[in-house]
Image (spheres, rainbow, N blue to C red):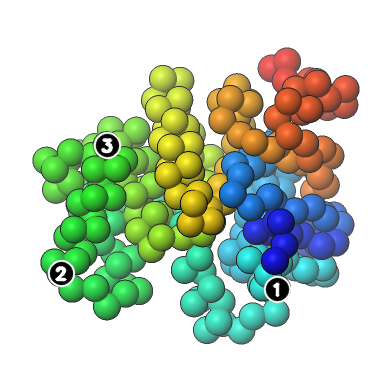
Amino acid sequence: MSEYSIEFQHLTKKFGEATILNDVSFGIVKNKITTILGFSGAGKTTLMKHILGLTMPTSGDVIVLDTTINKLGDLQLREFRRNFGMVFQYAALFDFLNSYENVAFPLREFTKMTEEEIKEKVMSLLESVGISKEAAFRLPSELSGGMRKRVGLARGLALDPHIMLYDEPTSGLDPITTHMVYDLMKETHYSNVHKGFTSVIISHDIHATLKYSDYIVFMEAGRVVEHLDVESFKKSENPVIRRFLEL
Ligand SMILES: Nc1ncnc2c1ncn2[C@@H]1O[C@H](COP(=O)(O)OP(=O)(O)OP(=O)(O)O)[C@@H](O)[C@H]1O
Ligand SMILES: [Mg+2]
């Protein structure tokens, strides 16, 4: 078994003439929180899509939990995606379903749980992210931005994933709520880590990132410029990173 839950080996992705990821090789350490940082357009979301097999490499391999994901067929890939929980930008809840039904959705879709079992699981997930019984039956439009992120997190956790992926989970939130969401991501991480749990966060929020992550991957123009533990990252002499840190 690898010490990495995700490994990129010479991953290159081109869209037409443009090289979006350029010979990316690194591993994301199991049971840790890794944040991918970088300016807009650096290729962070494209990298995350490769982890899910939503985009396939032009060349190179992506190995997730010891499986080469770009070699899986469609059906295997769909099954494999159960290992992941995802929280995307703007939470992306189904706006026609209340909180309860949003969290129940993956359980109805992918398991044979009974209504009673679903109820127990959904209520316990919502409670663990601090959503009250009353808010469980409200529509996303009747929740605050921070609450929507919490419901999104509960939904991402519904299938007991081994890897949580967050793409800009705090965009659009005020600084206090941002820290509350990061606290929750960290709590979630450490309450699941005994089962094997890796968190990968894409962020622009340098201050929250340094406080909550174990490792930082810094990307620029489709390449990984630096991959360090947080303390070493803070001391990096790389001028691009210094510029980012001084923002
Ligand atoms: N399907 C696609 N076809 C063509 N170009 C694409 C496609 N997806 C992404 N790109 C390009 O790849 C580059 C990297 O995009 P990506 O979304 O990965 O950046 P990012 O680091 O996530 O940026 P941001 O911080 O703004 O979210 C951009 O120039 C984008 O226009
Ligand atoms: Mg992005």
Tell me which label, 2 or 3, sits earlier in the chain: 2
Query: Where's the N terminus, which quadrant?
Result: bottom right
Of 156 and 190, nearer the camera is: 190
Asked whether the residues under the numbered discs 1 and 2 touch, taking CB atoms below 8 Å apart as contact, a structural biologist would say no
Label number found at residue 115: 2
94 up-or-down from 218: above or below: below
Secondary element type, mark 3: loop
Tell me which label, 1 or 2, sits earlier in the chain: 1
57 up-or-down from 189: above or below: below
33 up-or-down from 176: above or below: below
Q: Tell me the CA gap for discs 1 and 3.
A: 37 Å
Of 188 and 92, nearer the camera is: 188
Residue located beneath label 3 in the image = 130
Residue at image point 53% right, 73% down: 80
Q: Residues within 10 Å of mark 3 (few under 14, many from 20)?
A: some
Label number found at residue 68: 1
Q: Tell me the CA gap for discs 2 and 3.
A: 22 Å
Residue 87 in sight: no
Secondary element type, mark 2: helix
Q: Residues within 10 Å of mark 1 (few under 14, many from 20)?
A: some
x%, y% of residue 230?
Answer: 70, 30
What amino acid is at disc 3?
Gly
Of 37 and 5, nearer the camera is: 5
Q: Tell me the CA gap for discs 1 and 2.
A: 36 Å
| 114 displayed left or right of 195 | left
Asked whether the residues under the numbered discs 1 and 3 touch, taking CB atoms below 8 Å apart as contact, a structural biologist would say no
x%, y% of residue 85?
Answer: 46, 57
Residue at image point 45% right, 50% down: 192
Residue 2 in sight: yes
Q: Residue furthest top?
A: 246
Residue at image point 23% right, 39% down: 131
